[in-house]
Amino acid sequence: MAYFTRTGATTFTPTRHVGGAWKTDEQHVAPTLGLLTHLVELDRVARGRDDLAPTRLTFDIWGTYPLAPMETQVRVLRPGRGVELVEAEVACGGRRSVTLRAWLAAVADTRELEAGAPAPVPGPEATPSWDPTTDWPGDFVASIDVRRTMAGPGRGTVWVRTPHALVEDEEVGGLARFAGLLDVANGMSVRADPREVAFPNLDLTADLFRAPDGEWLGLDTTVTFGPAGAGLTSAVLHDVHGPVGVSNQSLVVRRRG
């Protein structure tokens, strides 16, 4: 079973695999990030812009949203020959839910300049399997395959993949599949027990210096809680060939109950 079923040109319905972690009757945001990336990629190809590649994905999460039908839209905010800014948005339950703004830049051969990437981490085959349902409820968390090594609270290396398609009976590119897992960075290397402390993220920004390849997303993650209710989850993003970029998530930190 896929995470979403397309019901029209701009409409989708979530399946049970999208069930959330903070509340199981709401959607987990991770698959929506993949869906919006998929829509940006479909739009890019439909406009004949194969010469452009996404270099930054910024998602703003407007609030929680139910397991209900979704309406989407895509528009080009800043057209250009070498750089474009594209916005994709999803509404659910009559409310705006998540917005993606993606910078696309012209592809160029800079292999002779390639340098400065962070160090690679041990791959998924060298990382122990871990059951994320020991920390989290919800059907999305139960749907993913996770490998994890913890160095301490809020500090760990995680590999994650999913056997499920993003959209039923629809070809989805590697970047969208990758983006559909990015949000788990905030939950797989926790600093505090989520049954005692809430730390949902308001956003997620991923900056990429090369396109990811393959089914695995690697996360070399650091979670920081500040003294006044704010936090930050930062991760170096990897595929099995090495690092591909970085992500950051702004957190609201509160004791539960």
Image (tube, rainbow, N blue to C red):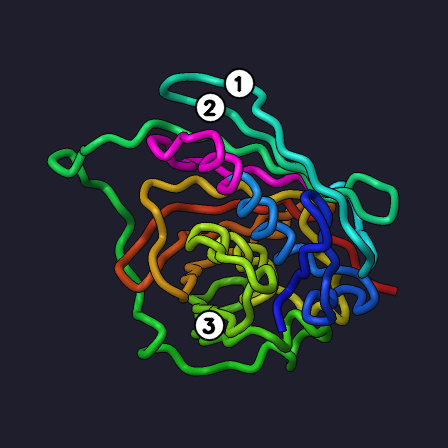
Q: Which residue is mark 3?
A: 150
Dot 3 lies on which element? strand
Residue at the spot 49% in from the left edge and 55% down from the top edge: 172
Residue 129 spot, x, y in % from top left: 45, 82
116 in relation to 26, above or below: above
Left or right placement of residue 230 versus residue 68 in this view? left
175 in relation to 77, above or below: below
Left or right placement of residue 54 versus residue 224 in this view? left
Residue at the spot 79% in from the left edge and 39% down from the top edge: 96
Residue at the spot 61% in from the left edge and 37% down from the top edge: 100
Residue 238 spot, x, y in % from top left: 36, 57
Q: Nearer the viewer, mark 3 or mark 2?
A: 2
Q: Earlier in the sequence, mark 2 or mark 1?
A: 1
Q: How many marks?
A: 3
Dot 2 lies on which element? strand
46 magenta-colored? yes
Q: CA–CA distance between discs 3 and 1? A: 42 Å
In the rendered structure, are the residues bearing label 2 and label 1 in contact, judged by CB atoms less than 8 Å apart? yes
- Return the residue nearer the eye: 198 or 124: 124
Amino acid type of the residue tagged 1 in the rendering: Arg
> Is residue 252 at least partly visible in the picture?
no
In the rendered structure, are the residues bearing label 3 and label 2 in contact, judged by CB atoms less than 8 Å apart? no
Q: Which residue is mark 2?
A: 84
Amino acid type of the residue tagged 2 in the rendering: Glu
Amino acid type of the residue tagged 3 in the rendering: Met
Q: Which residue is mark 1?
A: 78
**Where, by quadrant of the figure, is residue 256 drawn?**
bottom right
